[in-house]
Amino acid sequence: MNKRAEYIVINKEKEDKIDLIRNSFSNMYDVIDINCNNSPVREIELGLQKLEEAQFWIIKGITREEV
């Protein structure tokens, strides 16, 4: 199987890093939701989309880190 397509088993250290990232992004989403009142303004929606993308890539990077 191509290395880019294979399933990656993560260890406890990586799992802890991912949990920290998810919790940190969750806090950021809460701050935005509270201060922007779930506004449908395009710029806020784009900002949230970019945060989701950043979270995805950071977690992907953690799974690919060499131990």
Image (tube, rainbow, N blue to C red):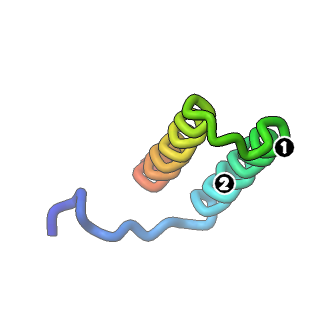
Residue located beneath label 1 in the image? 34
Amino acid type for the residue under numbered disc 2: Arg
* Residue at the (34%, 70%) spot, across then down: 7
Q: Would you call the spot at circle 2 few (<14 residues within 10 Å), some (14-19), or many (20 or more)?
A: some
Q: Would you call the spot at circle 1 few (<14 residues within 10 Å), some (14-19), or many (20 or more)?
A: few
Quadrant in the rendering for residue 19 = bottom right
Q: CA distance from mark 2 to mark 1?
A: 18 Å
Quadrant in the rendering for residue 4 = bottom left
Amino acid type for the residue under numbered disc 1: Ile
Give the image location of residue 44, x and y in percent. Answer: 62, 34
* Residue at the (44%, 70%) spot, across then down: 9
Look at the numbered discs 2 and 1 and tell me whether their residues touch, using CB distance below 8 Å: no
* Residue at the (48%, 43%) spot, across then down: 53
Give the image location of residue 22, x and y in percent. Answer: 66, 54
Q: In terms of sequence position, does the residue under pointer 2 or pointer 1 come before the other? A: 2
Give the image location of residue 33, x and y in percent. Answer: 77, 45
Rendered image: mark on residue 22: 2
Nearer to the camera, 41 or 58: 41
